[in-house]
Amino acid sequence: MYYTKPHQDNNVINVSRSPLPSTTKVATYNSKASTKLDTSVCLASDRYDPVWHHRPLLVSGLVNTGNSCFLNSVLQSLSSLPKLQTYLNSIDMLPTTMELPVTRSLLKTLKLLTVPSNGIFRPIELVSAMSSNRRVINREQQDAQELFQLISSELDNENQMTKKKQGFRDLLSLSTKRNTIENPFTGLLANRLSCIQCGYTEAIRHFSFNNVQLTLPNSDITTLDDCLKQLTTMEYLNDVTCRKCSLIDTVQKLSTEIETLQSSDNKFEKLNCLEKIKKDIEHRLDVGRIAEESHDDSKLKGFLSKVSRNSSKQAMFAKPPKVLCLHMARSAYLPTGEVYKNTCQIQFPQLLDLAPYCTNGTLNTGPLSPISSNDTTTRSNVRYKLMSSIVHFGSHNFGHFIAYKRRLVPTECGCHDCIGNVTSLKHHESEWYKISDERVDTCTVDEVLSANPYMLLYELIEDDVSDNSLLPTPSVVPNYQPEQTLEESESEESEGSVTTSLPSTPPPSPFVLPLQLSSCSSSSFQPLTTPKRRRDSTNNNAWNKTPVAIY
């Protein structure tokens, strides 16, 4: 059952079951204020609700201000992550004169979404902070994954800014302790490209990422493990330029040219130049300095070859992030070029073992061998616990986002009114919430696992104790049915007509297109958007009612 109640925060809206007066106002956030935002929020769960005559049973919902379900679902999902709140708290407590508007407004918003409450509010402080950082959230920003990427990028930017001395106070600071706090979403990927013919492998490169894009097959059902296997499997490519083969071919061309010049009496200067270049290339091949760019390369315009060979490519997780964000790329294409939503049902576990897809400390350079062996006797545990899920209802061009999140339990509150020094949170083992904008309800874990996710958020388990309370995904999804369209479903609403504008943010993952298999339907990511509000349902269930507009 959905509860609402008055709240002490000035951004929280007093809600009753009777129509609201037209004069109801919402507090605004002054993005130009010079004072930093106060992020103190009491998370104590023993507060008594005088309106409902009991302690709050749920958490706050978020007002849909018009096409904002993508924003609300992302914020609700982020609020289920203790490691994220710990990170934001650490940045907030740094001795800096900077305002850090996105970090602090996000921290306060997540705290408000964690504290037990029966109310709703608008996240106007975060939206204003994003606007003040020249990354405006508007009605054209309609995809949950885009917003997640935008927020993560802004957190990184503000973290980097705290590492610089900004003002006179910072310059005079006696503190020499460096900020080594890392974004919990950031991980590293090891990427290897090898020539099958000569065996040459360039340096194994490492790329950072903050979320991983998984491609779904053209089938009715798949598993998360199958998607991760496809992501990290060995791929064979044609017509890839090999640096070593190119240098070997260049030496052969130079040898032929030198033999021709030796028979000529007036080409001594050119002959000496080519012999010197050939000797330099042979030396680089002998000592293994193949990838090194030489100052003589500019003289090889007519000789330097570009030889294409069959190559192998593979990527694996080198440094798993503390919070793993998985994005299901559901954009697919018909032969006519029309884009549609891939509704493939994906089975996913509460407890995810990422170790088979991670490097084990030993990196192989052989073109036909994996980067790291999948030896269960030597690999360490890399286990993740499911914390939240974002689900999209509708087609590729319109629909509605909702969130499932695990309940967080405060073990210590560090607000002004409590005696704790820091805020400490732990996850609940079995209690989950289903949240659609203002509507909040409890749900079972079976309902979470049977939903068809658009995004999944897992948190790293940093101990070696196995969690037997979490069972793996069953072989068949509980009560699985193919996803309904909005015309068939009477359980979710869609939102107003808008267009989609992609923000200029870093790619979600450095390993999207090169590792896709031919059997996969999505060759590039396009956001899921939301045009045309659907008619109200006649069903009396609270999940089917159109949200009340509050102005």
Image (cartoon, helix red, strand yellow):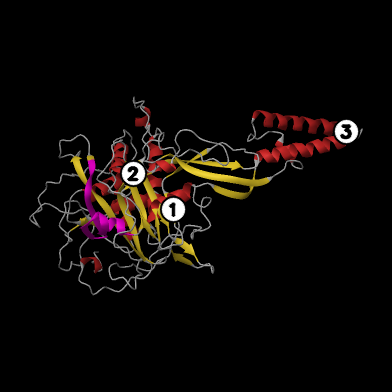
The reply to whether residue 72 is in sight is no
Give the Cα distance between marks 1 and 3: 59 Å
Q: Residue 223: where, in percent of width, then height?
A: 39, 54
- Label 1 amino acid? Leu
Circle 1 residue: 214
Q: Quadrant of residue 144?
A: bottom left
Q: Which residues are magenta?
A: 425-451
Q: Is the residue marked by circle 3 packed among few (<14), some (14-19), or many (20+) residues within 10 Å? A: few
33 above or below 176?
Answer: below
Q: Residue 126: where, in percent of width, then height?
A: 31, 51
Pick the front one: 125 or 414:
414
Instruction: Classify mark 1: helix, strand or loop.
Output: strand
Quadrant for the C terminus in the image: bottom left
179 above or below 233?
Answer: above
- Label 3 amino acid? Gln
Circle 2 residue: 384
> Which numbered disc covers residue 262?
3
* Residue at 75% across, 36% down: 251
Pick the front one: 497 or 195:
195
Q: Earlier in the sequence, mark 3 or mark 2?
A: 3
- Label 2 amino acid? Tyr
Q: Quadrant of residue 287?
A: top right
Q: Earlier in the sequence, mark 1 or mark 2?
A: 1
